[in-house]
Amino acid sequence: MSRVLVINSGSSSVKYRLFDEDVSGVVERIGEPGSGVPDHEQALRQLLSELDLSDLTAVGHRVVHGGLRFTEPTMIDDEVVAAVESLVPLAPLHNPPNLAGIAATRALLPGVPQVAVFDTAFHRTLPPAAATYAIDADLARRHGVHRYGFHGTSHAYVSRRTAALLDRPPAEVNVITLHLGNGASACAVALGRSVATSMGLTPLEGLVMGTRSGDLDPAVVFHLHRTAGLSLDELDDLLNHRSGLRGLAGVNDMRALLAARATGDEGAALAFDVYCHRIKSYVGAYYALLGRVDAVTFTAGVGEHAADVRAASLAGLHRLGITVDPDRNRAGAPVISPGGAEVTVCVVPTDEEREIATQTLAVVSGS
C-alpha cells in the first residue's frame, strides 16, 4: 500500500494511523484543562511532528455523516467542507470534530490530497423500502429524516473479509455482519451491497449498546416527558448516555457485565439476555430479507472477544442452518460454525483505518 495517513478526529481526541508502516498514535483530552493541547490543530501539529511524512500519497479522514449527498469517498475541497458543515444538524457530536481535523490537516499539509470517507456511504445502496420512515413525506424530505446507517467502513471491510474466508468474490455472497462494540449495529449485505442496517437517522436506533437504548417505542419519549417531566435534552441524554447496558445493569463494558453475570447478578443477567435477544431478532429479520445467507460475521470489541454473546445471539437458529461449535467459539477461531454448516459463522477483526486508507487510495488513483 502507498503511504496514506488516516485521521480520525473526535471531540476530544485525534487518532492517526500511517500506512503502510502501520504506525499509529493518539492525542487525547484536547481542550481540557491541564492537557496542554488547546485545539485540534495543535494536536495534529504534535502528531505530524513525530512522523516522517515524506512521499505521503494522501490523507484519509473519517467523517461520520455524509447525508444523502455523499455516496462514496470524496476528494476534499472547499465545496465538500461546506457540504459537510451543512450536515452538522444530523451529527452535531461528530461532524464538527471531523471538520476540525480536516481544517487542521489541510493547513499543515497543503500540498497533499485529502479524502473524506463517510461512515454513512456504504449504506446509500439501501432500497427505498429500507431507508424510508413512515412519517409525513414532505416533512421528512424537508428535514432530512431518512435511514442513513453508520459503521459503514466496518461493515464494508468485514463483509469483504468474510467473502475471502469463504473463498468467494464479495459479489456472490450474502452476509449478515454484526458490529458489536460500545456502539453496535447489524447490516445485511447482499452481493457486496448494504440492503438493510439497524442504525437509522442517528446511531441511536437498532441494537442494544453500551449506553444507548437501541430500538424503542417512540411513545416512551412522550410518556417520560409528560409523567417524569424530562426535557428534550434530558431525554436525549437518557437514551444516548444512560441506557443500554448501563441503564439495565449499571455498566457499559461487556467484560464487566459478563463478570457480574457470572456471580449471579440478576440485573447483569437480564441485560445480557436483552442484548442477545435483540441481536437474534435482527439476524432472523435480515435472513428473511436476504432470502439466502452464506455467513453471519461478528466483529468489533464485543463481537470479536465475547464468546458467550456469540453463542447466545445465535442459539436456537439451527432450523435456519445457523449453528455455533462450542469449542471453535471458545477459541475465537475465524470460523466458529461446525464443518459443513449451511451458514458459515465467522469472527473477523474489523480494521476501519485500513478500509479508510484503501478507499482513499482508490479516490486518489482514480480507480
Image (cartoon, rainbow, N blue to C red):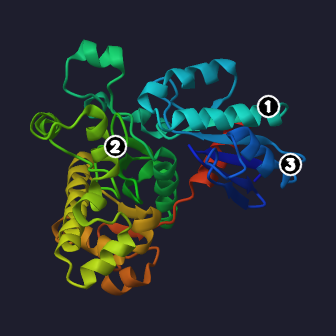
Q: Residue at x 29, y 43 (%)?
A: 205
Quarter of the figure with the C terminus: top right
Q: Earlier in the sequence, mark 1 or mark 3?
A: 3
Question: Where does residue 214 sit, x and y in percent of width and height?
Answer: 27, 48
**C-alpha span from label 2 to label 1:** 34 Å
Compared to residue 294, the image places residue 357 above or below, namely: above
Comparing 291 with 285, the one in front is: 285
According to the image, label 3 marks what residue?
53
In this rendering, position of residue 244 left or right of residue 134: right
Q: Quadrant of residue 109?
A: top right
Comparing 9 with 196, the one in front is: 9
**C-alpha span from label 1 to label 3:** 15 Å
Question: Where does residue 166 sit, x and y in percent of width and height?
Answer: 46, 65
Q: Are marks 3 and 2 in contact (CB under 8 Å)?
A: no
Compared to residue 14, the image places residue 363 above or below, namely: above
Compared to residue 103, the image places residue 274 above or below, namely: below
**C-alpha span from label 3 to label 2:** 37 Å
Q: Amino acid at mark 2?
A: Met
Q: Quadrant of residue 256?
A: bottom left
According to the image, label 2 marks what residue?
199
Q: Amino acid at mark 1?
A: Ala
Q: Earlier in the sequence, mark 2 or mark 1?
A: 1
According to the image, label 1 marks what residue?
107
Q: Amino acid at mark 3?
A: Leu
